Image (tube, rainbow, N blue to C red):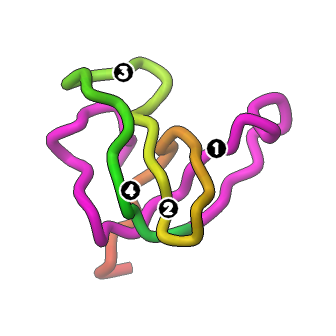
Amino acid sequence: MNGQNRKDIYPGLLVDIILKKDQRSGELTRGVVKNLLTSAAYHSRGIKVKLEDGQIGRVAYIIDEED
């Protein structure tokens, strides 16, 4: 699932994000959401979040915990 809708993202969720420095390469960073930073209900490039380890980026994918 992509991370463009704020309603799909919540603290504690496992996600892959794209950090600002990795936007050109598209390298993904996996982590657990601590805070949502985008207030809009939808963002075309992904909802911006802060991970529990302090990194900030836009959600590329929501990890399905059943996989």
Residue type at tag 1: Ile
Circle number at residue 18: 1
Q: Are marks 1 and 2 in contact (CB under 8 Å)?
A: no
Query: For the residue carrying disc 1, how many other residues have a C-alpha within 10 Å: few (<14), some (14-19), or many (20+)?
Result: many
Three-letter amino acid code at the position of disc 2: Leu
Q: Say few, some or many: other residues with alpha carbon within 10 Å of mark 4 (under 14 / 14 to 19 / 20 or more).
A: some
- Identify the secondary structure beneath mark 2: strand
Work out whether 51 lies above or below 3: below
Few, some or many residues within 10 Å of mark 2 (<14, 14–19, 20+): many
Q: Are marks 3 and 1 in contact (CB under 8 Å)?
A: no
Q: Which mark is residue 62?
A: 4
Between discs 4 and 3, the one toward the N terminus:
3
Marks 2 and 3: CB-CB under 8 Å? no
The mark lying in front, picked from 2 and 3, is: 2
| C-alpha gap between disc 4 and disc 2 | 13 Å
Q: Residue at x 23, y 57 (%)?
A: 10
In-image side of 30 versus 63 (left or right): right
Query: Which of the marked residues, 4 or 2, is nearer the chain's N terminus?
Result: 2
The magenta region covers 1-30
The quarter of the picture where residue 63 lies is bottom left
Does 23 sit left or right of 65 as displayed? right
Residue 62 occupies which quadrant of the picture?
Answer: bottom left
Hey, which residue is sitting farthest left in the picture?
7
At x 33% / y 45%, what residue is drawn?
36
Circle 3: residue type: His
The residue wearing badge 3 is: 43
Pair 4/2: label in front: 2
Q: Nearer the viewer, mark 1 or mark 2?
A: 2
